Amino acid sequence: MLESTNPLKTNSPLQSATIQDNSFAPENDLNTLNLNGSSQSLNDEVLTADFGAQDNPNPSPYISSPAVFADFNGDGIHDKFWRNTATGENAIWLMDGANPTGAAVNTLGTEWNETIGDFNGDGKTDLMWRNGSTGENLLWLMDGTTITSETALDTLGSEWDFSISDFNGDSKSDLFWRNSTTGENAGWLMDGVSVSSADFLPQLDSSWSYTIGEFNPNFTTDVFWHNEQTGENAIWFMNGLDANASQLETFGAGWKYEEGDFDGNFTTDILWENTSTGETKVWLMSGSNVTASDLPTLGAGYESRIGDFNADGKMDILWRNQSTGENVAWIMNGSQATPVELQQFGGEWDATVGDYDGDGDTDVFGRNTQTGENFFLRVDGTDVVEEELPTLPTEWVF
């Protein structure tokens, strides 16, 4: 499918191999798939819903983005998408604090994996599906729990993975593709279910990992690159499918990194964590300018989730130790971290974050992988209240 037709353009100095003169545009004969759906194992008490529209009061576009946190009906409350790993059944919980309302949606085989985005820019979460065995791709445009469109996109080999982006700033999710075998990269600019433009981007070998962020606040997302072996770092500032590369200081070989806007200036910052020593650092970003600061040392075994627990528009950090069950939230103000101890829950519990009651504060959603129990911690700054949620069988995952 990668037929040689168009010369690619790049001004990136980070190109590690010669870029082929190829076209990455998918075929135009997109097929609509008719999929069958059912779900008998969902609890009946969470199968109907009617929500009014409302905006999330949090000032951060990260929190309100339906391409970052699932919000299928656009009411400003983060929702939950459930997938049955045994049957391929799917369901959605439209959240309203401790009173979720659920609905089954179409079933897809267990070889399919989903990623959220907002491909038509309506402020409601859509689902991009990829078949890890065949390389098939499928796009669901959503309106609440209704699939308004099911469209097949072009097939790409299983060695390609993708991330959600918005490279042209039209508030419609685009796709960034990376070939884990060859190091090739490409972008699809999306307009609903149509690929409006597609092309290769500079090639980087497999020692480079990446994350999508917004490093210069111009309403287009960029790509942060980190070389896991050498510690080299760089940013591709994106303008559509043109990548303008800027090298950063070398740091972080052997460190994990996470993104978030920790100082509330609407640009993405980088959180670094040394998983061996427990050391943490933050890079506050302004374009390619880095202000680096040390953060407290936690000790090994903690993993991070990013949210905003006091609704000030500055991202905070939930640290969870899966082995000990310890949890602590860092309320961030730039490079200053104020710890808030949360209740412990054991390693059989998985935890995610989101604003499940729409008050602007990020909450913690817990699921017991052994019993199927669910709860969420309603967080309001330093005040935490536990709320029980319906139980689902353990084969359902979020």
Image (cartoon, grey):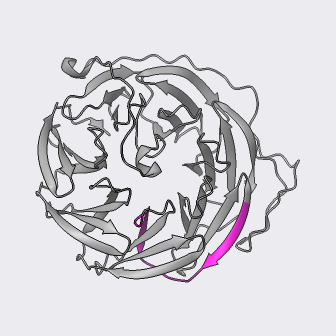
Q: Is residue 254 magenta?
A: yes
Q: Position of residue 27 (x, y in %)?
A: 76, 33
Answer with the quarter of the image where residue 152 lies: top right
In front here: 249 or 268? 268
In front here: 79 or 323? 79
Q: Is residue 147 magenta?
A: no
Tally of numbered tags: 0
Q: Is residue 70 left or right of residue 249?
A: left
Q: Position of residue 380 (x, y in %)?
A: 20, 51
- Give above or below for 333 relative to 70: below
For the point 58% across and 20% down, the residue is 33
- Give above or below for 397 relative to 163: above
Q: Is residue 253 left or right of residue 352?
A: right
Q: Position of residue 24 (x, y in %)?
A: 76, 46
Look at the image and tell me in which quarter the N terminus lies.
top right
Look at the image and tell me in which quarter the C terminus lies.
top left
Q: Is residue 269 left or right of residue 313?
A: right
Magenta range: 243-263
Q: Position of residue 29 (x, y in %)?
A: 74, 25
**Does the image show residue 184?**
no
Answer with the quarter of the image where residue 190 lies: top right
Q: Is residue 235 left or right of residue 389?
A: right
For the point 11% across and 57% down, the residue is 343
For the point 35% across and 21% down, the residue is 104
**Does the image show residue 163?**
yes
In front here: 66 or 297? 66
